[in-house]
Image (cartoon, rainbow, N blue to C red):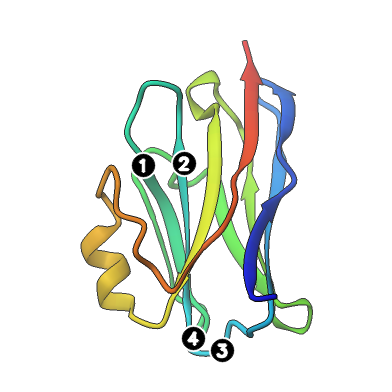
């Protein structure tokens, strides 16, 4: 079965850290751009960051820049989102998506609803307590 799955969410205190994983099965990340999104209750989806697997280039939203880091382990077909210095406003369901088109991800990164990527995984819940 071809799918993308985010995992690693949980409950953490403000100032703490979590590492989320985005694992692909049935396909490899070669030539894909992998993006992280999040959606808090009653809010639209927000782009967190993305990585182009071909060269490892990354981009981060201003709201997480300097606190979150995207990395990958190609052998494990997994992309990670390391989240440090977490704040209560980081609480959300986090999703990962993969698409062959970097341009599409750039164009839709700030869309509150677009999900038409090659792969869009189930989310993982992150809750940051104050």
Q: Residues within 10 Å of mark 4 (few under 14, many from 20)?
A: few
Q: Residue at x 64, y 75 (%)?
A: 2
Would residue 83 be found to the left or right of residue 114 on screen? right
Residue 80, percent from left and from top: 66, 60
- Of residues 58 and 45, the one nearer the viewer is 45
In the rendered image, the vertical position of residue 3 relative to residue 27, given as above or below? above
Q: Give the SS element for disc 3.
A: loop
Q: Residue at x 38, y 38 (%)?
A: 63
Residue 55, percent from left and from top: 49, 86
Alpha carbon of mark 3 to alpha carbon of mark 2: how far?
Answer: 24 Å
Q: Residues within 10 Å of mark 3 (few under 14, many from 20)?
A: few
Q: Give the SS element for disc 1.
A: strand
Q: Residue at x 63, y 22 (%)?
A: 128
Instruction: Tell me where residue 99 sits by quadrant.
Output: bottom left
Alpha carbon of mark 4 to alpha carbon of mark 3: how far?
Answer: 10 Å
Residues at marks 3 and 1 touching, judged by CB atoms closer than 8 Å: no
Q: Residue furthest left?
A: 107
In the rendered image, the vertical position of residue 54 relative to residue 47, given as above or below? below
Between discs 3 and 2, the one toward the N terminus: 3
In the rendered image, the vertical position of residue 21 relative to residue 100, given as above or below? above
| Residue topped by disc 3 | 30
- Of residues 15 and 35, the one nearer the viewer is 35
Would residue 34 be found to the left or right of residue 21 on screen? left
Between discs 4 and 3, the one toward the N terminus: 3
Instruction: Tell me where residue 28 sits by quadrant.
Output: bottom right
Between discs 3 and 1, the one toward the N terminus: 3
For residue 46, which numbered disc appears in the image? 1
- Of residues 44 and 71, the one nearer the viewer is 44
| Residue topped by disc 4 | 55
Between discs 1 and 4, the one toward the N terminus: 1
Alpha carbon of mark 1 to alpha carbon of mark 2: how far?
Answer: 5 Å
| Residue topped by disc 2 | 38
């Amino acid at each position: 079965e071809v799918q993308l799955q985010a995992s690693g969410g949980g409950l953490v205190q403000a100032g703490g850290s979590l590492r989320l994983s985005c694992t692909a099965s049935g396909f490899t990340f070669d030539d894909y751009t992998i993006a992280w999104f999040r959606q808090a209750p009653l809010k639209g989806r927000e782009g967190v960051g993305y990585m182009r697997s071909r060269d490892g280039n990354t981009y981060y939203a201003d709201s997480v820049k300097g606190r979150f880091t995207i990395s990958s382990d190609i052998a494990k077909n997994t992309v990670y989102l390391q989240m440090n210095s977490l704040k209560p406003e980081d609480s959300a369901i986090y999703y990962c998506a993969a698409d062959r088109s970097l341009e599409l991800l750039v164009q839709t990164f700030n869309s509150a609803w677009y999900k038409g990527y090659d792969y869009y995984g189930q989310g993982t819940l992150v809750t940051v307590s104050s």
